[in-house]
Amino acid sequence: MSNIVLYELEGCPYCAKVKQKLADLDLEYESRMVPRSHAEREEVEAVSGQTGVPVLVDEDHGVEGMSESDDIVAYLEETYGEAA
């Protein structure tokens, strides 16, 4: 089992983009759904310092709370893609 965790929100297009890249790379990950209310997102805030999603944690590579879907997709491709 991978040590990748994705904090996400159902229906979030940015989260869907990251999930598609995870699927394209055939990576296993743990999905953690966050509440709709930003005020209730204590867990994701503790990990990343902010309440937006998606947020990626990849313990195997020392990533403790990467946000921004474009950054996450680029990281996944660089770390796990064919060029890796």
Image (spheres, helix red, strand yellow):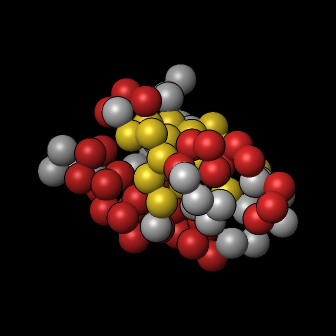
Residue 37, position in %: x, y? 84, 66
Which quadrant is home to the C terminus? Answer: top left
Identify whether 84 is placed above or below 73.
above
Which residue occupies the extreme top position in the image?
A: 1
Q: Is residue 37 left or right of residue 61?
A: right
Residue 55 location, quadrant: bottom right
Q: Is residue 41 visible?
A: yes
Identify whether 22 is placed above or below 29.
below
Q: Is residue 30 left or right of residue 23?
A: right
Q: Is residue 43 left or right of residue 62?
A: right
Which residue occupies the extreme bottom position in the image?
A: 13
Please state which of residues 17 and 38 is positioned toward the viewer in this rendering: 38
In the image, what residue occupies the spot 26% across and 45% down? Answer: 79
* Count of numbered marks: 0
Residue 64, position in %: x, y? 45, 39
In the image, what residue occupies the spot 41% across and 59% down? Answer: 72
Q: Is residue 24 visible?
A: no
Q: Is residue 14 left or right of residue 83?
A: right
Residue 62 location, quadrant: top left
Residue 50, position in %: x, y? 58, 59
Residue 3, position in %: x, y? 50, 29
Please state which of residues 18 and 8 is positioned toward the viewer in this rendering: 8
Identify whether 24 is placed above or below 31.
below
Please state which of residues 20 and 71 is positioned toward the viewer in this rendering: 71
In the image, what residue occupies the spot 53% across and 50% down? Answer: 48
Residue 32 location, quadrant: top right
In the image, what residue occupies the spot 37% across and 27% down? Answer: 60
